Image: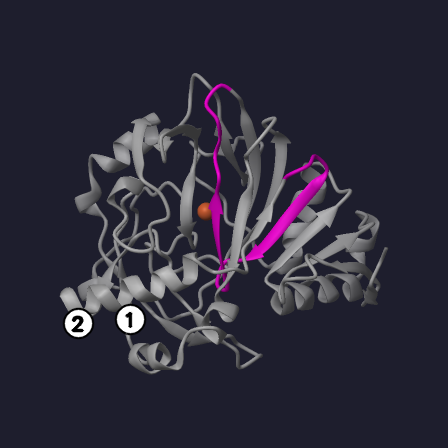
Amino acid sequence: MVDSERGGLKLTRLSDDLPFGAIVHDLTLECLDRARTRQALYDLWIAEGVVVFEGVAGEEMQLKLSSCFGKLIAHPTREARADHPALMTVRYQPDDGWLLTVNGESRGSWLPWHSDLIYVDRINRGGVLRPVKLPSSLGETGFIDKILAYETLPDRLKSRIEGLDVIYQYDLDPAHQRFGRTADVTVERYTEGIRSIQSRLGEFPRVIHPMVYVQQGTDRKVLNVSPWFAVGIHGMENTGGDALLEEVAQHIVRSPHVYLHHWKMEQMVLWDNWRVLHCSTGCPQNEERWMLRTTIEGDYGLGRTERNANADGLDYISV
Ligand SMILES: [Fe+2]
């Protein structure tokens, strides 16, 4: 079953059809004390972008595993467990949760393709997600590799986007998404927190990120576009610029190389937020989905707020 052993890790490919992603088997708390194992996990994360861990459970494991990849961000009290501020709750319940209509069907906490925190200047390095309670169907997390997206982009588009930047604006209503839409969406019910955010969107400055950048240490180019939250190309907020951004965004979201993770208990998934996009297929309206996420700190140093706006102290909900 195990394809290879790298740095003592027992590995299989995530899929024979995908050039990214790996599965790690038989990881234990004790082996995370070994520097060699921690380095091998870090190297695997950079090489593969998405890593699934099979047969792992519990808060201690999630926190210790996450610490292999960097410092963890503590979340605002509203989203975090009081005893573990590094664990963010991602939860939909039938009577309390974000409910949307997606292509005519009710879905709890459906999320379009996005990079976490792309709507601020410092996008976090990654995260580790773990299920606490899963619905009987749906509830998947999807991943798209933006290195592969760049490699498969037609040459005529590669030359047109070289040196361009994308503008992002915080707005959690997916019905307002302008580029790379994959579904007709309307919000049926907000959470209190999201409703509060939506009532004061003007507080959040627009931010700018490069459309292409080079992954540190590998020289691989990343097609750095998050369809959700993108509002235009910097200096090209016009019909031509919008058409270009839509063509690039559609290239990404129509990728034939999507990995859709069908969750089981005693799994964790690590992703490189600088390299892969993710989405959530949401869960059935009358079922619960409860996940816990860590957020790995980092700054790739390429984002900036528009007009040097001061975004310190703003109260964001992280998605
Ligand atoms: Fe997210």
Q: Which residue is mark 1?
A: 165
The kind of secondary structure element at disc 2 is loop
* Residue 102, quarter of picture: top left
The kind of secondary structure element at disc 1 is strand
Determine contact: label 1, label 2, CB under 8 Å. yes
The answer to whether residue 93 is left or right of residue 7 is left
Q: CA distance from mark 1 to mark 2?
A: 8 Å
The answer to which of 58 and 281 lies nearer the viewer is 281
The answer to whether residue 281 is left or right of residue 159 is right
Q: Which residue is mark 2?
A: 235
The answer to which of 258 and 8 lies nearer the viewer is 258
Q: Which residues are magenta?
A: 263-286
**Mark 1: which amino acid?**
Asp
Badge 2: residue crowd in 10 Å (few <14, some 14–19, many ≥20): few
Q: Position of residue 238 (x, y in %)?
A: 13, 66
**Mark 2: which amino acid?**
Gly
Q: Position of residue 21 (x, y in %)?
A: 64, 60
Q: Looking at the image, which residue is at 72% across and 43% down?
A: 61
Badge 1: residue crowd in 10 Å (few <14, some 14–19, many ≥20): many
Q: Is residue 237 visible?
A: no
Quarter of the image with the C terminus is top left
The answer to which of 269 and 285 lies nearer the viewer is 285
Q: Position of residue 45 (x, y in %)?
A: 64, 63
Q: Looking at the image, which residue is at 44% across and 64% down?
A: 299
Residue 280 drawn in magenta: yes
Q: Looking at the image, which residue is at 35% across and 27% down?
A: 191
Q: Looking at the image, which residue is at 73% across and 37% down?
A: 266
